[in-house]
Image: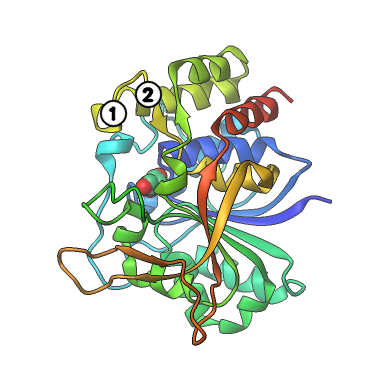
Amino acid sequence: MSQRVIFDCDPGVDDGVALLLAFSAKTELDLLGITTVAGNVSAELTARNACLIRDIAGRTDVPVFAGCTRPLVLEPIEAGHFHGESGLGDLPIGTPTRGAAREHAVDFIVRTLCDAAPESISLVITGPMTNVATALSREPRCLKGIKDLIIMGGARREGGNITASAEYNIYADPHAAQAVFNAGPRVWAFGLDATHQVRATPARTAAISAIGSPIARAAAQLIEFSNALPANGPRAQGSPLHDPCPIVWLLEPDLFEFLPCHVDVETESRLTLGHTAVEFRARADRAQNVRWAVHAESEGVFSLISRVFQA
Ligand code: RIB
Ligand code: CA
């Protein structure tokens, strides 16, 4: 039976690859909607980019909902240096055949989760968690509809990628992240500890491109844009493929290993803002409601990506 999913993202080059993968997994994933948020680029551009990726995948049957334009408390911090001015690297940018829906992303999330059967919808988040945190605080009743909260964000062993101690998605809205990590439903967290193991080497990227379909070629072009960025390390090593990891896990869970933990997010310190304090030691006074990804079977991840794009 296909899994019912709301996919919240800030496309974004790697969000774009994750969207292409999710759109391609037609029988495994029932995508109820794509919700977009300000993050890598503005809220206007992330919504447009989701619609453009949807066109490439031929999935205009899936609605896109534009969301929050700024973090809960702090000023917006974009990551255009990793994603290009458009947010989709060097992909050609046209006008989407269908735009975002009129309904706000937060209203869609609240309505869909409140109307859903208990624990029947998985929420994937690959950007700042502003939309989901706003939805859960506006209407706590919608918590009941969540099966799993599947997040790309955070870092422990690997250290940060936007500051010494913080990963971008958490740093961009630490107040939202703290709220979502501690909202109650079980969280599956794909931090840099896992995503840095998933490297798009030139051989892996070429194998995706060689599939030859418009979707596979677009994915390879997005990946190659990241690979060419000096900030992502030597090209031979390949850039880390962050945002597809939660989608890959939905399709083949055994490709990742997790440890139970509790996560708190630094929201005050100037030096360590956005740090995820990942505590693996169990304590009697609080639940370990986060599963922290500690290992990725990277060869298997890329085999699955190629398999889905070839189908
Ligand atoms: O740190 C990686 C995350 O930040 C990814 O989601 C990427 O798209 C950026 O948003
Ligand atoms: Ca992202």
Q: Contact, CB < 8 Å: mark 1 with mark 2?
A: yes
Among the 4 quarters of the image, the one containing residue 69: bottom left
User: Does the numbered disc 2 mark a residue whose Cβ is under 8 Å from ligand 1?
Assistant: no
Local SS, label 1? loop
For the point 67% across and 78% down, the residue is 144
Decide if residue 96 is in sight here. no
Residue type at numbered disc 2: Gln
Local SS, label 2? loop
Q: Give the residue at mark 2.
A: 237
x and y, in percent, of residue 191 in the image: 43, 52
For the point 49% across and 15% down, the residue is 203
x and y, in percent, of residue 198 in the image: 48, 35
- The mark found on residue 233 in the picture is 1
Q: Quick one: 256 or 161, which is closer to the camera?
A: 256
x and y, in percent, of residue 42 in the image: 33, 51
Tell me: 100 left or right of 79: right
Residue type at numbered disc 1: Gly
